[in-house]
Amino acid sequence: MNFTVVWKPEAERRLATIWTDAEDRAAIARAADAIDSALAIDPEGVGESRSSARRILLEPPLGVIYRLSTEDRMVIVLTVWSYRRGGSN
């Protein structure tokens, strides 16, 4: 049974900005799709737990913080950022 993945409006806007500014837009799109798929299938099995019932998932070149509600089968992506492996943005 899959989870529904919802991105907060602020996270959607940030993702759009990241994509617009990216040198490799295809990589951003692939990472966002992979994040959506992973969170829909197994949000508890991917990423790592953080404080305040939040979790972090890294799918290069993106990272997200999300919260999940197992009762509602819902995942809410709270924020997104881009990064480079071994370096800064």
Image (cartoon, grey):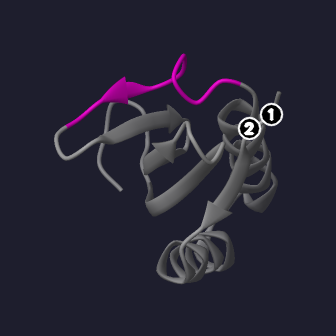
Q: Could you tell me what secondary structure mostly forms the magenta stretch?
A: loop
Q: Which residue is drawn at 48% across and 34% down?
A: 58
Q: Residue furthest top?
A: 45
Q: Residue at x 69, y 53 (%)?
A: 5
Q: How crowded is mark 1: few (under 14 residues within 10 Å), some or many (20 or more)?
A: few
Q: Residue furthest front?
A: 71
* Front label number (1 vs 2): 1
Magenta highlight on residue 48: yes
The three-letter code of the residue at mark 1 reads Asn
* Residue 41 spot, x, y in % from top left: 75, 28
51 on left or right of 39: left
Q: What stretch is highlighted in magenta?
A: 42-50
Q: Which residue is drawn at 62% across and 48% down?
A: 72
* Residue 48 spot, x, y in % from top left: 36, 24
Whole-Å distance between the Cαs marked 1 and 2?
Answer: 5 Å
Determine which quarter of the picture holds residue 19.
Answer: bottom right
Tell me whether the residue at label 1 lies in contact with that at label 2, contact meaning CB atoms closer than 8 angstroms. yes
Q: Mark 1 points at which residue?
A: 2
The three-letter code of the residue at mark 2 reads Ala
* Residue 49 spot, x, y in % from top left: 30, 28
Q: How crowded is mark 2: few (under 14 residues within 10 Å), some or many (20 or more)?
A: some
- Tag 2, which secondary structure? helix
Res 89 seen here: yes
- Tag 1, which secondary structure? loop
Res 64 seen here: no
